[in-house]
Amino acid sequence: MADILSSLAENGDPTAQYLLSCQTINGVGVTANEDTGWALMEQASDNNNPDASVILARRLEAMGGDRAKIRGLYIAAAQHNNTQAMLWLALDALDQGDGTKAEAHLKQAWELGDPRAATLLANRFAKSAVDRLT
């Protein structure tokens, strides 16, 4: 499997880059090499793989990284319909006092089917008990 992914990754396939990076970071089916794995993860993110962008953002968060860079990675993922990124951006907007932006991110995530977004919308933005239930 790693041989196939490696060939595809070398040809710029972002999904293959992402999957191979996970294998390489964790040493699954290949020799573990975190430096190479994270470099592949960055390539996947640069090639618009939203899952890679979320993983990189979460890693930066854990390391106390630059908030603007973290936000940029989540924005990139959200632009490719990653609802986890949309939820983070909504909470970030709430932290910044921008309820309108938060609500927009949550509505988009809900339209894409993420039930967590519906819960947050109901709890934060419902104007009545009926709105909360629907």
Image (spheres, rainbow, N blue to C red):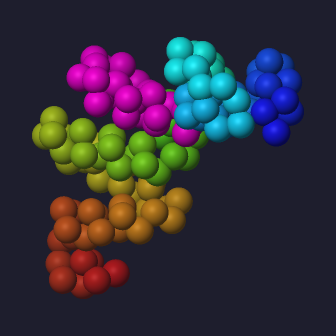
Q: Is residue 94 above or below residue 119?
A: above
- The reply to whether residue 13 is in sight is yes
Question: Which is more toward the observer, 130 or 6?
Answer: 6
Point 17% across, 78% down: residue:
128
Most extreme residue toward the front is 31
What type of secondary structure mainly makes up the magenta span?
Answer: helix
Point out residue 66 in the picture as x, y percentages from the top left corner. Answer: 28, 17
The answer to whether 10 appears left or right of 68 in the picture is right
- The reply to whether residue 45 is in sight is no
Q: Is residue 56 within the magenta segment?
A: yes
Of the 4 image quadrants, the one containing the C terminus is bottom left
Point out residue 91 in the picture as x, y percentages from the top left corner. Answer: 25, 46
Find residue 131 and report its image quarter. bottom left
Q: Is residue 130 above or below residue 64?
A: below
Q: Is residue 62 within the magenta segment?
A: yes
Q: Is residue 9 above or below residue 84?
A: above
Question: Which is more toward the observer, 9 or 127?
Answer: 9
Point out residue 97 in the picture as x, y percentages from the top left corner. Answer: 13, 40
**Bounds of the magenta segment:** 49-74
